[in-house]
Image (cartoon, rainbow, N blue to C red):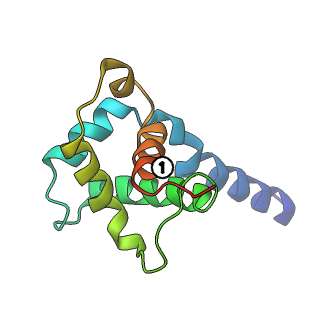
Amino acid sequence: MNKFSFYLCVFFTCFLSNPFVFAELADGDSFLKYIQITDHENVNSVTGYYDGYINGVADSTVNVNWCPPYDFKGSQLLKTITRYYKENSMDSGEVSADAKDLILYALMDTYPCSK
């Protein structure tokens, strides 16, 4: 195998194993169950996955769909969303939404952008 073929194989292996390829698989029901029962101070792989997922959604939509205060820290995201869904009841349509939609909805409702 020549060098080009080797690097091409490595590239496709990394690309296809990238977790962002599977981002749509995080369903809302699993996400809500996780944030309601998990000790967020005890970091494990599931906590890391959802924390990264939340940060990805938040980073890609900040100051477009939601506008946090100036002193807002990224470390507050998981606690903000957990608190939001503990304080607000949900209908069946929300539970069946994707996790990214639930994250965005909570952030937009908590930190709306002024028009």
Q: Where is residue 108 shown, x and y percent of the image?
A: 48, 49
In this rendering, position of residue 4 left or right of residue 42: right
Q: Where is residue 29 shown, x and y percent of the image?
A: 30, 30
- What residue does disc 1 label? 108
Instruction: Decide which of 52, 92 is in the foreground and name it.
Output: 92
Residue drawn at point x = 37 percent, y = 59 percent:
51
Residue drawn at point x = 38 percent, y = 20 percent:
93
**Residue placed furthest toward the top:** 92
Place residue 113 in its image quadrant: bottom right
Q: Which corner quadrant holds the N terminus?
A: bottom right
Instruction: Decide which of 71, 94 is in the foreground and name it.
Output: 71
Q: Where is residue 23 shown, x and y percent of the image?
A: 52, 42
Which element carries disc 1, helix, strand or loop? helix
**Residue placed furthest toward the bottom:** 71
Look at the picture and state if 2 lies above or below 82: below
In this rendering, position of residue 32 left or right of residue 108: left
Looking at the rendered structure, the kind of residue marked 1 is Met
Look at the picture and state if 34 lies above or below 93: below
Instruction: Decide which of 68, 12 is in the foreground and name it.
Output: 68
Q: Residues within 10 Å of mark 1 (few under 14, many from 20)?
A: some
Q: Which corner quadrant holds the C terminus?
A: bottom right
Instruction: Decide which of 31, 82 is in the foreground and name it.
Output: 82
Q: Where is residue 114 shown, x and y percent of the image?
A: 58, 58
